[in-house]
Amino acid sequence: MKKGIHPDYREVVFHDLSSDYKFLTRSTVQTKDTIEYEGQTYPLVKIEVSSQSHPFYTGKNVLLDTAGRVDKFRKRYGTKENSTPTSTAQ
């Protein structure tokens, strides 16, 4: 491998701000923030969503009402039941 062309691969702490969850992993992400974690200082990356706060992993999924969306669309824009498609070719 050529020297000097690869990013610095190091241990980084990711902090989920919504659930106050921190985890240590390796990454090449660049950051100026640092944090004291388990007795050592690591670079810190602040994130909004992790497996501790994402609805899919926490079981707090919101089911989408697709039928309600269709009705809402039809109510807003109306429907043309007896319309015929227009063609520009003659």
Image (cartoon, rainbow, N blue to C red):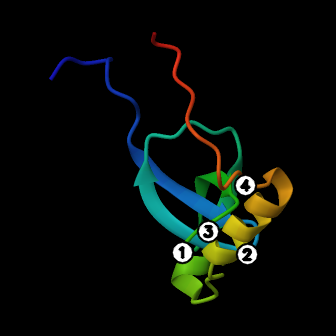
Residue 52 visible from this viewpoint: no
In this view, the residue in front, 52 or 41, is: 52
In this view, the residue in front, 29 or 43, is: 29
Amino acid type assigned to the residue bearing label 1 in the image: Ser
Q: Counting residues from the N terminus, which is met first, the one under dot 1 or under dot 2?
A: 2
Q: Quadrant of the C terminus?
A: top left
x, y percent for residue 19: 72, 77
Q: Which residue is mark 4?
A: 79
x, y percent for residue 5: 32, 18
Amino acid type assigned to the residue bearing label 2 in the image: Asp
x, y percent for residue 49: 64, 65
Q: Which residue is mark 1?
A: 51
Q: Which residue is mark 2?
A: 20
SS at mark 3 in the image: strand
C-alpha span from label 3 to label 2: 13 Å
C-alpha span from label 1 to label 2: 12 Å
C-alpha span from label 3 to label 1: 19 Å
Residue 30: assigned label: none
Residue 86 drawn above or below residue 35: above
Residue found at x 78% / y 66% = 72
Q: Nearer the viewer, mark 4 or mark 1?
A: 4
Residue found at x 62% / y 68% = 37
Q: Are marks 3 and 2 in contact (CB under 8 Å)?
A: no
C-alpha span from label 4 to label 1: 42 Å
Furthest residue in direction top, as rendered = 90
Amino acid type assigned to the residue bearing label 3 in the image: Tyr
SS at mark 4 in the image: loop
Q: Which residue is mark 3?
A: 37
Q: Residues within 10 Å of mark 1 (few under 14, many from 20)?
A: few
Furthest residue in direction right, as rendered = 76
